[in-house]
Amino acid sequence: DERMILQFQITLYGDDERLVMARDITRLHRLEEMRRDFVANVSHELRTPLTVLAGYLETYGDMAEQLPPRLARGLQQMQSQTTRMQNLVNDLLLLSRLENDQGGQDDARLDPASLLETVRRDAEALSGGHHRIEVEVTETRGLLGSEKELHSAVSNLAFNAVRYAGEDCHIVLRWRPCRDGACLDVEDDGEGIDPLHIPRLTERFYRVDKGRSTATGGTGLGLAIVKHVLLRHDARLEIDSRPGEGATFRCVFPAGRLVDDRPQVDCRRA
Ligand code: ADP
């Protein structure tokens, strides 16, 4: 379509002077759209061959005991790298869906307390008992949002705490009132993050320690997904951390997203 996209910047000088600048960003916008479509198409096309590969590898995996050790090790490597690629493709697809559509289609009245409890259980399974994980709820209101998207965002934050905080840490998943509305915090008392990295953490593929992140099974897209899910819920992500003093990832939801009466959707999962 032939729409032109303009970006305006208004600068105030004193009480009665304004400087208005208009920039034609039509081309930039188109390029961004092409990038999104390309990523979405490639990820989609990669899904089927990866599923076929994973299927064969699983069948051969059942025969690993009969293989010479070197081949069995190779097979194991192929399996883990295929799983990594599948996670990457799934996260890329999820991210482009979050960027491309408006959101709001599956918004419902949610019960954050049960959502946090579900995530706590999954995080505990991932942690294998190496962390103390707790849920704290002091906000009684529910949340208007997409259960699937918020589950994915909170899981990413909680799994990151398990992966990066270090062993024997205390992790708290919290739903509490805050100045702007209500906050959903994921807090750990682990290794923390150098402030230098914090502004870039939500960029795609940005990692503090690439080697370690790959070893823990991360795709580098987790916090980008969190940021986009929150944007679709009129919410924002705040990150507080200092090396050696843990990290807090705070999802701030505006009052307009809160619902007073009892939420209808219980987010507990089997
Ligand atoms: P991934 O985990 O796949 O690398 P993310 O976008 O989820 O990608 O996270 C980006 C980086 O932020 C991680 O690689 C890690 O270095 C850092 N990080 C995230 N959460 C924590 C945390 N709770 N404590 C310390 N570092 C963290």
Image (cartoon, rainbow, N blue to C red):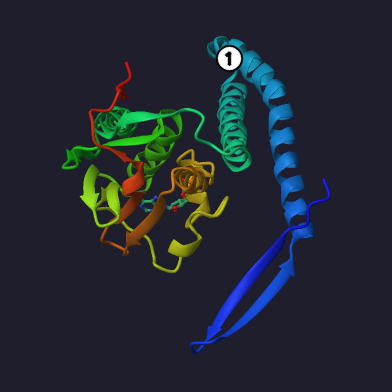
> Which corner quadrant of the image does residue 19 belong to?
bottom right
Q: Position of residue 116 (x, y in %)?
A: 28, 34
Q: Position of residue 206 (x, y in %)?
A: 54, 55
Q: Position of residue 225 (x, y in %)?
A: 51, 43
Residue in the picture at 74% in, 28% down: 45
Amino acid tagged 1: Glu
State the residue lying farthest toward the bottom: 14
Question: Dividing the image into 4 quarters, which one contains the C terminus?
Answer: top left
Q: Nearer the viewer, residue 229 or 145?
A: 145
Q: Quick check: 173 left or right of 13? A: left
Residue in the picture at 59% in, 32% down: 81
State the residue lying farthest toward the right: 2
Few, some or many residues within 10 Å of mark 1 (<14, 14–19, 20+): some
> Which corner quadrant of the image does residue 267 belong to?
top left
Residue in the picture at 72% in, 51% down: 32
**Residue 48 higher or lower than 261, as above or below:** above
Question: Dividing the image into 4 quarters, which one contains the N terminus?
Answer: top right
Element marked by disc 1? helix
Q: Position of residue 7 (x, y in %)?
A: 67, 65
Q: Nearer the viewer, residue 204 or 78?
A: 204
Q: Nearer the viewer, residue 256 or 110?
A: 256
Q: Which residue is mark 1?
A: 58
Res. 56 in view: yes
